[in-house]
Image: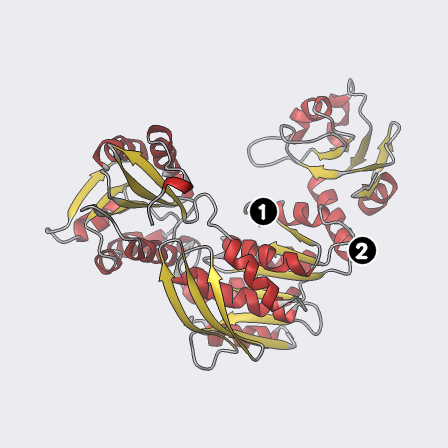
């Protein structure tokens, strides 16, 4: 049996108190009693909405080998016979274990932050580095105060490359996370007005992203977007933090890792890039210039981390968009089919524009329409009405024939759209879903984009539930 952690190492790393006959080790770490598998350790974290201690018995019934619990909650768990490690604070214990995981590995560590493209870049790094060694990366968007230490704690000792996504929506949130991760290479994908309601201006957002430089190990590397207006500010911050090597990526002629050309295609594209003195032609499995731009940073990180850049190209070719982040579906209706582009995971002004560019590059067929199904971008603060109204220009540039909108903030865009554009407005996602289900026609291309909290994922789910997918083998070219 290969243990992720021996019980002795768990106790030592967390300075915990063992109760019962601990197993020799555990095969994994979980904070979800429903998803835990046989032999894993369950950490009973107290979150904002639920307390993991309330689900400790479920975790035990589902196969937890041991429980990590709080001293204060121990009396309420008296009937459980599963072995336990008792600690003062379970989240702090998870952080300590994550730091121990980072200390024990010789892996090259890459961290990614940015206003847009973190998760996709993390997944590209995962795919790109697999041919070069054992890769460990965060699942989903585990990029916050519990997701980062959980991902660290799950990292096997024999990992060759560790990939971590680091997020924030307030100043000061990246600093403690990067102190745990201690990357050799850090990427800042871009700085854009995301979570603008929590910041004074875009420069303050850039300063918060720049906290990632404080955790880069001595002799490490920062990779920054030279096409972004905050590039000079980030360079200055990286140098002030003592980063030994500051690199740039982008289409700018001065970029070290340079995007030379991108040929968009409906299901991907062809990227031409200059990386480490080589000119590479990289088939992209995921569509969109914004994906290609971040792929250049990814290839730069592979180069700096000592991975095989040419083998990394195959990983990028094999990559497909994830749920909510550009995944495409062809769905049957009335003897034909329409295309659904699922961008429902989250939204800010920059990612909205990127999603509309995907709509532009996706051709309708048989007289179909280009339809933007858009919901509110949350956390935009006092500038919300203005940034929503400003989407009228990108909508026109995308060649959208229809705009189907919902949410209080999208009322500003509805008012800003020209009279000649076909447009619909509903109060919320559920009301719009009822309209979309009936209004979509064969030949249409729809992009669904909104912040996660608006519930636009339900529009995607309703479409997928009502209209059957066209199997890949039956699709037309």
Identify the image quadrant of residue 51.
Answer: top right
- What x and y, as percent, mark residue 250? 46, 72
Residue denoted by label 2: 104
Identify the image quadrant of residue 430.
Answer: top left
- In the image, residue 341 sits, relative to residue 298, either above or below, namely above
Residue at the spot 52% in from the left edge and 65% down from the top edge: 188
Residue at the spot 64% in from the left edge and 67% down from the top edge: 308
Q: Which quadrant does the N terminus fall into? A: top right
Q: Earlier in the sequence, mark 1 or mark 2?
A: 2
Q: Is residue 449 left or right of residue 157?
A: left
- What x and y, as percent, mark residue 267? 39, 53
Using the rendered image of the protein, determine whether residue 189 is visible from the camera's viewpoint.
Answer: no
Q: Is residue 15 left or right of residue 172?
A: right
Q: How many marks?
A: 2
Residue denoted by label 1: 142
- What x and y, as percent, mark residue 252? 42, 77
């Amino acid at each position: 049996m290969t243990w992720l952690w021996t019980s002795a190492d768990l106790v030592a790393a967390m300075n915990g108190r063992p109760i019962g006959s601990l197993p020799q080790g555990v095969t994994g770490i979980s904070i979800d009693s429903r998803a835990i598998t046989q032999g894993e350790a369950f950490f009973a974290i107290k979150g904002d909405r639920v307390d993991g201690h309330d689900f400790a018995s479920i975790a035990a019934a589902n196969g937890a080998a041991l429980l990590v619990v709080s001293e204060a909650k121990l009396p309420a768990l008296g009937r459980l016979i599963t072995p336990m490690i008792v600690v003062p604070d379970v989240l702090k214990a998870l952080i300590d274990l994550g730091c121990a995981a980072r200390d024990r590995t010789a892996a090259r560590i890459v961290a990614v932050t940015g206003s847009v493209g973190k998760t996709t870049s993390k997944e590209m790094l995962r795919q790109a580095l697999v041919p070069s060694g054992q890769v460990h990366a965060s699942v989903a968007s585990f990029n916050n105060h519990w997701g980062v230490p959980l991902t660290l704690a799950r990292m096997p000792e024999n990992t060759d490359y560790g990939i971590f996504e680091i997020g924030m929506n307030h100043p000061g949130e990246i600093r403690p996370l990067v102190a745990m991760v201690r990357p050799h290479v850090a990427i800042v994908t871009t700085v854009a007005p995301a979570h603008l309601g929590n910041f004074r201006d875009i420069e303050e957002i850039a300063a918060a992203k720049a906290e990632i430089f404080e955790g880069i190990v001595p002799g490490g590397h920062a990779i920054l977007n030279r096409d972004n207006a905050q590039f000079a500010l980030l360079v200055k911050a990286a140098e002030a933090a003592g980063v030994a090597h500051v690199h740039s990526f982008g289409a700018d002629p001065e970029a070290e890792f340079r995007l030379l050309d991108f040929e968009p295609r409906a299901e991907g594209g062809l990227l031409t890039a200059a990386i480490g003195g080589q000119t590479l032609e990289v088939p992209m499995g995921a569509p969109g210039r914004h994906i290609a731009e971040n792929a250049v940073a990814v290839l730069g990180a592979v180069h700096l981390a000592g991975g095989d850049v040419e083998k990394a190209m195959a990983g990028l070719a094999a990559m497909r968009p994830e749920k909510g982040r550009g995944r495409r579906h062809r769905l049957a209706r009335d003897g034909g089919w329409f295309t659904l582009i699922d961008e429902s995971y989250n939204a800010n002004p920059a990612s909205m524009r990127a999603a509309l560019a995907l709509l532009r590059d996706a051709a309708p067929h048989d007289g179909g329409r280009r339809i933007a199904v858009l919901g509110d971008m949350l956390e935009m603060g006092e500038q919300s009405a203005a940034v929503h109204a400003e989407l009228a220009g990108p909508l026109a540039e995308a060649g959208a024939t229809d705009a189907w909108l919902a949410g209080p903030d999208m009322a500003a865009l509805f008012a800003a759209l020209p009279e000649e554009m076909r447009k619909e407005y509903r109060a919320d996602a559920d009301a719009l879903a009822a309209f979309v289900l009936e209004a979509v026609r064969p030949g249409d291309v729809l992009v669904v984009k909104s912040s996660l909290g608006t519930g636009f994922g339900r529009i995607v789910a309703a479409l997928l539930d009502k209209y059957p997918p066209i199997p890949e083998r039956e699709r037309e070219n």
